[in-house]
Image (cartoon, grey):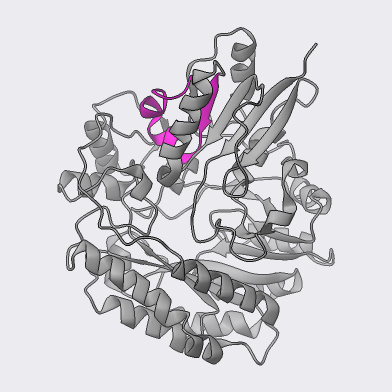
Amino acid sequence: MRTRIIHLINPKTDSLTTRPLYLNRALYSPLAGLLAVAASIPRDQYEVVLTDENIETIDFDLKADLVGISAMTSYVERGYEIADQFRAKGVPVVMGGVHPSFMPQEALRHCDAVVVGEVELVIDKLLGDLRQGAMRGTYRADRLHPMAGMPMPRYDLLKRHRYLNRTFVQTSRGCHHGCTFCAEPLMNGLKFRYRPIDEVIYEVENCGERTISINDADFFGTPERPKEVMRALKGRGITWQAGVTSKLAQDDRMLELAAESGCTMLSIGFESISRATLKSVHKYVNKPETFAALVEKIHSYGIMVFGLFMFGFDGDDLSVFDNTSKFNIDANFDACAYSALTPYPGTLTWYEMKKANRIVSFDWTKYDQGHVVYRPAQMSGPELRLGLEGAFANFYATSSMARRFPLRGKRRRAQWLIYNLFMRKASRTEDISSIVAPTPEPDLAPMPPILPVKREWRAAVLEAAGGGPGPHMT
């Protein structure tokens, strides 16, 4: 009997961090989600083939029993093309990921089934229906996964030599911060769910790498849990990096444990140097007056700071680009990434801009945080795009890199140089020269997998989506 094959595919992303730029390697692997999906598929029943189109071509002639495609908004159209091509060959297709979870009816025009939200609690039902030839429609769990007993991601499927950062270990799901532009709380909830620490450590010890990324939305999300994880990591010879928010990164004991357990870099979503702007998008945790001192404090523990900033908020005028990049250089940020505010379908920013008739383009390929798909309040779309390019150019100028290079202290100079060279080259090879053209509105409305907590926001979402049945509540 022929071995049944499931072909999991990540469509081409072409982002700053997934483009192979040096030695044919990308800075990050985008496959953490698909590796977890692969782990939930019974090995004794299926062979799993994994393809990342960023680094390899898709074998459309592979005799697969099922194709699974994960997609975010900016590359969902490529996902639809792939799905259409496989279905034309008679191969059933299931889609998942952020965009299909928010717009399942749109995705079902191109695939047989959609997994909305997390896959772990619905995979058995989906595969059972596949065997019966009855896999179709949406698959959504009636509760969120408790994160206990999760199988280890299928790292054996990863082409490790094609990425610098390739191992992403998840210790929690959820985020306490309801930022209006972010899909995270609408996918995974505002409450944290924690994976048992012994299971986290088992994965760390058996993933085949000694350098890992912690793949949580906010690893420093609560005061005590990250400390427990870091105590467990101490003495294991692991180096790691993680994404955190700024508040608990001020905690000296947190930073002391981070350094002792092998942390080399913290990525922090600072977003803006304007307190009024941060309040307007509900990023209350950030206080710009503390940013420079926070960078200095983190450096004192030998840890680098990767700052994430966004332009195009309603409070931003043309001065924001130079002011922000100059601040980042003066404050000695190790690396920075700048993006254009993007109203992802289903987020609160989407509904606000949609109601105000400010969204210009509904071409999902342009929802990449580089193109400008809406009308900014205090500048034109082209001015926002040019300002974004200018911020990158200022921060990664040769003079800036020479000034910021960590000659003293315990920060890892090789890692610093790799990130700066990658980001410098990536920003200079961005091919976003065209102005986004207006498009008609989609005929289907997004519906978040989890409704917002605030009553007025829930009402706005349900009204815009036609008053359909409500998804999970947090």
Depicted 302 relative to depicted 438: above or below: below
Looking at the image, which residue is at 25% across and 36% down?
459
Please tell me in which quadrant of the rendered image residue 53 appears.
Answer: top right
| In this rendering, position of residue 314 left or right of residue 152 | left
Q: Residue furthest left?
A: 356
In the rendered image, residue 381, in percent from the top left (x then y), is placed at 22, 62
Which residue is the extreme one toward the front?
A: 61
Q: Position of residue 178 (x, y in %)?
A: 39, 52
Q: Going 21% across and 37% down the picture, which residue do you hit?
A: 441
Which residue occupies the foreground of this view, 31 or 1? 1
Residue 279 is covered by the magenta coloring? no
List x then y, in percent, for residue 379.
18, 68
**Quarter residue 251 falls in:** bottom right
The answer to whether residue 405 is left or right of residue 328 is: right
| Along the viewing direction, whichever of 380 and 460 lies nearer the viewer | 380
At x 31%, y 50%, the residue is 343
Choose between 248 and 327: the one closer to the eye.
327
Q: Nearer the viewer, residue 52 or 183?
A: 52
Residue 374 appears left or right of 147:
left
Q: Residue furthest top?
A: 132
Residue 109 highlighted magenta (yes or no): yes
Q: How many marks?
A: 0
- The magenta-colored residue range is 92-112
Say if 193 sits above or below 288 in the image.
above
Q: Position of residue 192 (x, y in %)?
A: 55, 48
Q: Is residue 412 visible?
A: no
Residue at image location 49% in from the left, 39% down from the top: 71
> What is the quadrant of the C terminus in the image?
top left
> Looking at the image, can residue 471 be seen?
yes
Figure quadrant of the N terminus: top right
